Image (cartoon, grey):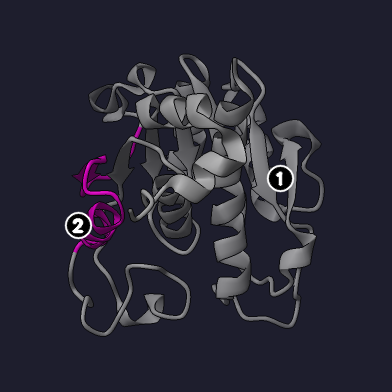
Amino acid sequence: MEEHWSSRTERLVGAEAMERMARARVLLFGVGGVGSWCAEALVRGGIGHLSLVDPDCVETTNINRQLPALHSTVGRPKVEVMRERLLDINPEADIVARQERFTRETSDSFCLQDYDYVIDAIDSLKDKHDLIVETCRVTALLSSMGAARKMDPRQVRVSEFWKVDGCPLAASLRKRMRREQRFPARKFKCVWSPERMDNAQPGGTSVAVTASFGLTLASLVLQDLAKQR
């Protein structure tokens, strides 16, 4: 008899951990170069409920690094493309697609407190700051720092936010927090890299790095669920 699609993960972490993963509720903001690979790894890892939030449609310039981006999907909402793909991986998963943008004004509509983990993979500095502050009040947060202008996935690291050193995005966030006197209420982990290619043009990206960021974010969730008792 053919084994279940998740049997190799169960061999790794055990049946009880797989049950926890199936019950876990994860909210992911951003399904671009980082978030799309995170979503893929979460569902392949056994996460049973995943809500995807992203306002954008697939563009041709996304094809070099984003999982939903193909010539055949250009113009379609990223969250819809990802939802179709993820349900093809696990038809029993509860995948919610919201083509929306998180802002301080819309934060209540996302019911952050209803999730076990919130993952931040968005680019906007203002929205990122608001998401961090709002999430840390109510549940666990994992956040992606800047993945642009980098090519070496061997330099990808995980650190608590205030210990991230050498990331311009993290520095900008801390500066904004101090200026507005709005700080996260709890510590949270970040995926980041100190690499900076100064000769690269703004917005230059490599899938080897953005995907590594996303896979690392997913692994933090899956490892946390695997070790719980």
Answer left or right for 20 relative to 82.
right
**What's under tag 1, amino acid-wise?**
Ala
Residue 209, percent from left and from top: 63, 67
> How busy is the neighbourhood of tag 2: few (under 14 within 10 Å), some, or many (20 plus)?
some
| Residue in the foreground of this view, choosing between 3 and 229 | 3
**What's under tag 2, amino acid-wise?**
Glu
> How busy is the neighbourhood of tag 1: few (under 14 within 10 Å), some, or many (20 plus)?
some
| Residue at image coords 39%, 75% | 62
Identify residue for label 1. 171
User: In the picture shown, does residue 168 fall above or below 228?
Assistant: below
Identify the secondary structure beneath mark 2. helix
**Which contiguous range is marked in magenta?**
77-103
User: In the picture shown, does residue 153 fall above or below 176?
Assistant: below
| Residue at image coords 66%, 47% | 191
Residue 11, percent from left and from top: 56, 42
Identify residue for label 2. 80
Identify the secondary structure beneath mark 1. helix
Number of on-image labels: 2
Labels 2 and 1: the sequence-earlier one: 2
Q: Is residue 225 magenta?
A: no
Examine the rendering and report whether any part of residue 81 can be seen: yes
Q: Which mark is residue 103?
A: none
User: In the picture shown, does residue 73 fall above or below 222?
Assistant: below
| Residue at image coords 59%, 36% | 13
| Residue at image coords 18%, 68% | 76
Residue 229, percent from left and from top: 59, 15
Q: Is residue 96 magenta?
A: yes
